[in-house]
Amino acid sequence: MQLMTGDEYVESIRNMNWNIWMGGEKIENHVDNPILRPSLNCLKLSYDMALDPAYEDLMTVTSHLTGNKINRFSHIHRSTDDLMKKVKMQRLMGRKTGSCFQRCVICDGSNALYATTYDIDQKYGTAYFERFKRYMIDVQNKDLIVAGALTDPKGDRSIPPTKQSDPDMYLRVVERRGDGVVVSGAKAHLTGITNAHEVFVMPTMALSPEDKDYAIAFSVPTDAQGITIIVGRQSCDERKLEDGDIDVGNSVFGGVEGLTIFDRVFVPNERIFLNGETDFVGLLVERFAGYHRNSYGGCKVGVGDVLIGAAALIADYNGIAKASHVKDKIIEMIHLNETLFSGGIASSANGVKTASGNYYIDLLLANVCKQNVTRFPYEICRLAEDIAGGIVVTAPSEKDLRSDAVGHYVEKYLKGANGVSAETRLRALRLIENLTLGTSAVGYRTESMHGAGSPQAQRIMIQRQANLEEKKKLAKTLARIEQ
Ligand code: SF4
Ligand code: FE
């Protein structure tokens, strides 16, 4: 099967045997659940756009593994052009959804594993690379969504996995069998987990030799025996249960994250891609993080486009669009957003070929890109709130607008400039609220800080990659310092 339609994708998720919990209850039909459905819609769109000729160039590509046309999210990059198109595709998807669209980790994780399984085989004579290629062919041919699980709960952050008082603070192998391994533990903040066919698990950080049981990378179906998903609560998520569509701000799309528990989950040998090679874990994590930090130069920029558009709209509706300080604030938002995009494109354009044959981003530039992402969206949010005014958090509800008793007051006193109705104005304000403080703030604001690694993680990589000694030499040469 090739390139599912969005509807086929939705049915494929519906037909799985899920164990999803939210608000203390087991969710029997998450596909039609009003809180969860917007997140599924993002993935559905990624299928429909791949079949739309208008987006074919960005959304699809020819697989080097099969020669078939595949969704770009499942592609192993063959050039810097592929890396740039990935970022452009992510910006496009961010613009269409105004949300985290959750499909990128398979792209970033699979490219990291492709290169690293090759390297492990070179050193140890293992056969992970061919196994991983077979897995990717399966993912591509079936057009699957694979969620990526990296972050362990970590317990006491100051001590390594084996020293934790509770050994499950990092996911680990608890039993080794002839046909595979059994794992236990949990992964936190698991983006898109309720909308994925498979979950792809990797260690969260570099490990030392005694942490061998924690050095495991594998993929299993998201409905495998022993997996429990507890959906993360988002700000204002219960507005999705109300009648009407104004107060949610973005009623069609959204993100989802979940705490995912692996309670003695069996992983067959064919789905294990790293098993005990602790010396390669750091490289795998670094590569995955590098790719994913490059991705943020696309996805967050696309969502930033939506927020800038909403700020410009509310300026029009409030009759302040011509004020010079408002124009300047919008320019500043654009400048910040395009600076993020520059980091995404530059880290792609400067990519390099790995020994395995795929292309890897420029690690220093990808980390600089993501470091900027930990800051600029906050400033873009601040400027959007500045332009929108305090009403972004004080406006009456849609129920008041629709009320027979007080609706006319809302209409009268919240209308905008030049005949703009209260409803139109409220829709723009609620979208700004959604992106800065509501459900989409998970994907735009806080995820900008912590997704793909918190700011300090990038600073460590920037320090490592910057080659300060070479810069000192440059200075010495010009200053004619002999030593
Ligand atoms: Fe993709 Fe961005 Fe969401 Fe990560 S945060 S999954 S890169 S949209
Ligand atoms: Fe993310």
Image (cartoon, helix red, strand yellow):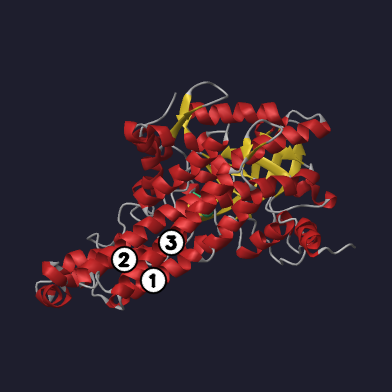
Task: Name the spot of residue 407 as percent of width and height, x first.
Answer: 12, 73
Quadrant (top left/top right/bottom left/bottom right) for the C terminus: bottom right
Q: Nearer the viewer, mark 1 or mark 3?
A: 3
Contact between marks 2 and 3 (CB within 8 A): the answer is no
| Mark with earlier residue (2, 1) | 2
Compared to 162, does 332 lie above or below?
below
In the rendered structure, find residue 311 and report the number of the disc placed on it. Answer: 2
Q: Residue at x 54, y 64 (%)?
A: 374
Instruction: Please name the residue that numbered disc 1 is placed on.
Output: 383
Report if the beta carbon of the residue with label 1 is closer than 8 angstroms to ligand 1: no
Contact between marks 2 and 1 (CB within 8 A): the answer is yes
Report if the beta carbon of the residue with label 3 is closer than 8 angstroms to ligand 1: no
Considering depth in this image, is 242 or 472 the residue closer to the camera?
Answer: 472
Horizontally, is 128 left or right of 245 in the view? Answer: right
Q: Element type at marker 1? A: helix
CA separation in Å, label 1 and label 3: 12 Å
Classed neighbour count for the residue bearing mark 3: other residues with Cα under 10 Å, few (<14), some (14–19), many (≥20): some
In the rendered structure, find residue 335 and report the number of the disc placed on it. Answer: 3
Q: Element type at marker 3? A: helix
CA separation in Å, label 2 and label 1: 8 Å
Considering depth in this image, is 459 or 19 the residue closer to the camera?
Answer: 459
Task: Name the spot of residue 73 as percent of width and height, x first.
Answer: 49, 38
Classed neighbour count for the residue bearing mark 1: other residues with Cα under 10 Å, few (<14), some (14–19), many (≥20): some
